[in-house]
Each structure stands twice: as structure tokens, then as C-alpha cells.
Image: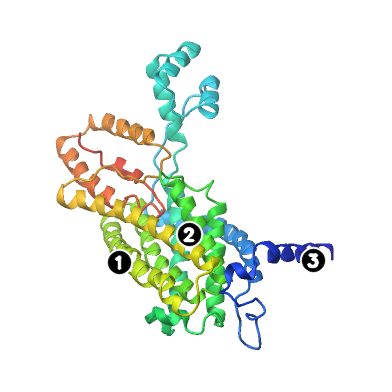
Amino acid sequence: MGCFFKLRQMEALLDQWLWRQEYWLPPGITWKDIKTSGDSRYPLPRDLLITLPLALGFIALRYIFERVVAVPFSRQLGVRDRIQVRAAPVPKLEAFYTQNSRQPSQSEIVILAQQCDFTQRQIETWFRCRRNQDRPCNTKKFCEACWRFVFYIVAFSAGLTSLIDKPWFWDPKECWNGYPYQAIAEAQYWYYVMELGFYWSLLLCVSVDVKRKDFKEQIIHHIATIFLIGLSYCGNYVRVGTLVMLVHDSSDFLMESAKMFNYAGWRKTCDTLFVAFAVVFLVTRLVVFPFKVIHSTLFLCLDVFDPFFGYYLFNALLLLLQALHIFWAWLIIRMIYKFVFMGKVERDERSDEESEVEEEDEEQEEEDDDKEESSWEQGKGALNSKFTTLADNCVLKNLTKQRNNTSSRFPKAR
């Protein structure tokens, strides 16, 4: 009884400060005007409370899925983890590594060498080896990509099935026909809450997932997406909101599938999927999203209501999302340009590692291996390096994401 009373208090507090009707509804419209009646369901803020337990359920389901399905599947596809040499246990160096810096400066290396009675070369080698231990293995990255692929393909299929026969799927003007008195179907309601619950789970797991160079951009993306889904539901922007989610899901599952085959070493399959992903991403994020969806929310809706707080906030978040699309699209286009017109691709600009120093470590190890290889193998490795970088580019790593550690199978040419 006490728990129920606290929930009612929390709901009343949210209604008073966060869900004020003048924030999220056009002038002259109240929450009482938008309510569930008969067989029709209308969006209400309290409906979103279910997304938090859903997020916890997604996390638990992911834990089971990765161990029961993803790991055995990765072995079937041939995913192999690189064998890492563990750093020798040196308490002083370990304390410096965990408490100060993963990459000591030259002056710090000198001091550590004196304290541990090591040479500077031994100190540098120890820190490189220690950083390698913290690198995510291919199996971990494959499991993350596999989990996201399954969700995105299911979400895209469900969303397309529920929207393809709706008039606003073909004509954005229909998104505002009868607004805000627009009932939502049960399928669209679950499409909304499942997407929101999933992005909550991604945000909650961001500290344990593989970290990448665009870590901050990913955090911004998740937060903006959560706000967009939640606020669009509260303001009954459900029709245009379903279009936004469908546009994003259409390319995300291609990206995750390409990463899966990348970690498994299936080069041609990965390249084909990446090309498909790049085409779909550029078309949906740079053409459909701004010229159809954002144009509708910025201009077409003004024929139905006057601007209010929710209008400005919703469009600001959409424009923020579009800025991230342009950032990622620029990285894709630049990488493709270098590959097609310059005949080479620089190292992935959005890798799984937390710093560029670790990339240099891997390059050094590969250069050491090159000393024992023939010139024919070096040329072969150079060719494979181009396709590997193309497949494992900044956006291919998750938009998410991840650099191909299997390159050790074919050492790069000097």
C-alpha cells in the first residue's frame, strides 16, 4: 500500500513539473482532451513508465542471448580471438597504470625505470602489453553486434509491417491530419515502448560496452533518441515518431550484420553488406530524414497549430540528430573517397580502442611480424588491409564501432 502511495506521489510530481500540458500540447489543448476512451488509445505520459522495467528486461535478455546464442554462433562463423601476452605482475607499474595514466610520458618512463630497476624499453613494452590486455576481444564485439542486429532487424520488420498501409507512411502531410486527436494502434504503441526501452538499455550498458573514439557522440545520440521518443509520445507526435524510428532502423541492422561478418573474417560478405549499409544510410539520413521528416515537423505542422515549447524542443532534437548524421556521413564519404580515388584508406577513424596510442601499439607489433614474411605475403597483406579498413570504418563500428583484430592473419606491408 505504501509503495502504491509513493508511485501516486511520483506521478503527481511529474504531472506538476515535467508533464505540464502547456509544455507538450498546442495552445488550448489539455491532457483531459487527450484520453483513452472505448477501444481507442491515446498517448499519455504515464504510459512510458513501463520502459524502465523493459530496459532491465532487455539487459537480462541480452546477457542470456550473448552466452546461449551469440557465442556459439561466433564459433560457427569462425570468429577467433587474438592471443594476448599478459604483462608481468609489477605492482608499481600496475598502480601507475590504474591510478595515473595508461600512456606515461617520457619523463615518467624514466622515473618508473629507476624505481623498478628496468630499462626504458622494458617499461614501454610493459605498458604496451598491459594496454593490449584491456582491448576487447573479437568475440565480445561480435556478441554486441549480434544482439543489436537481432533487435534492429525485428524492430524494422515490425515497424514496416505496422506502417506500410498507413497514409502518413507515403505522405508526411497525413502526420498532422486531425492532430492532436490521433488514436494510436496497439502495434504502434508497443513499437514505441520497445524502442524506448531498448535505448534505455543501451545507455545503461554504455560503461561496460566496447568504448570507441566517438564515445561522446554515441552518448549524445542515445540521450537525444531517448528524449525524442519520449517527448514525441507525450505530445502525440506518434505518427512522425514512427517514421523517425523506421528511418534509423532501416540502416542499423545492415551495419551490425556487416560488423558480424567482419569479425568472422568473411571479407566479401562484409564488403557487400557495408556497401548496402552506406547506400541506405546516405539516402535515408541525408535525403529522406531532412527533406521528408524534418520538413514535415518544421513547416507542414504549422498549418495545424501554432508553435509552442514542445514544437521547438522536438525540432531542436531532430536537428541535433541530423547533425550527427552529417558527421558520420562525412566520415563514410571521406573514407570511400580515399579508397576509390586515392587507392588507399587510412586507418579507421572510429575504432574500438579508447586512444590512438593503442593503434600505434598494434602497428608496432605488426611491423615486427613483417620482418619474418616474404614480399609476396606483404603485398597480399596490403591489399587485404584496404578491404579491412573499408569494412571496419568509423560508422561501421556502430554509429557504433569496431576495428578488425583479425588483420594479424595477413600482416601489413611496410
Residue type at tag 3? Phe
Percent x, y for residue 64? 56, 58
Q: Nearer the viewer, residue 288 or 374?
A: 288
Image quadrant where one finds the C terminus: top left
**Circle 2 sits on which residue?**
147
Quarter of the view holding residue 248? bottom left
Q: Residues within 10 Å of mark 1 (few under 14, many from 20)?
A: some
Q: Which mark is residue 4?
A: 3
State the CA–CA distance, disc 3 to disc 1. 48 Å
Circle nearer the N terminus (3, 2): 3
Circle nearer the N terminus (3, 1): 3
Q: Residue at x 37, y 60 (%)?
A: 257
Residue type at tag 2? Trp
State the CA–CA distance, disc 2 to disc 1. 25 Å
Q: Residues within 10 Å of mark 2 (few under 14, many from 20)?
A: some
Front: mark 2 or 1 = 1
Q: Which mark is residue 283?
A: 1
Question: In this figure, which colouring scheme has been used for the structure?
Answer: rainbow
Circle nearer the N terminus (2, 1): 2
Q: Nearer the viewer, residue 57 or 249?
A: 249
On screen, 320 above or below 377? below
User: Residue furthest toward the right?
Assistant: 1
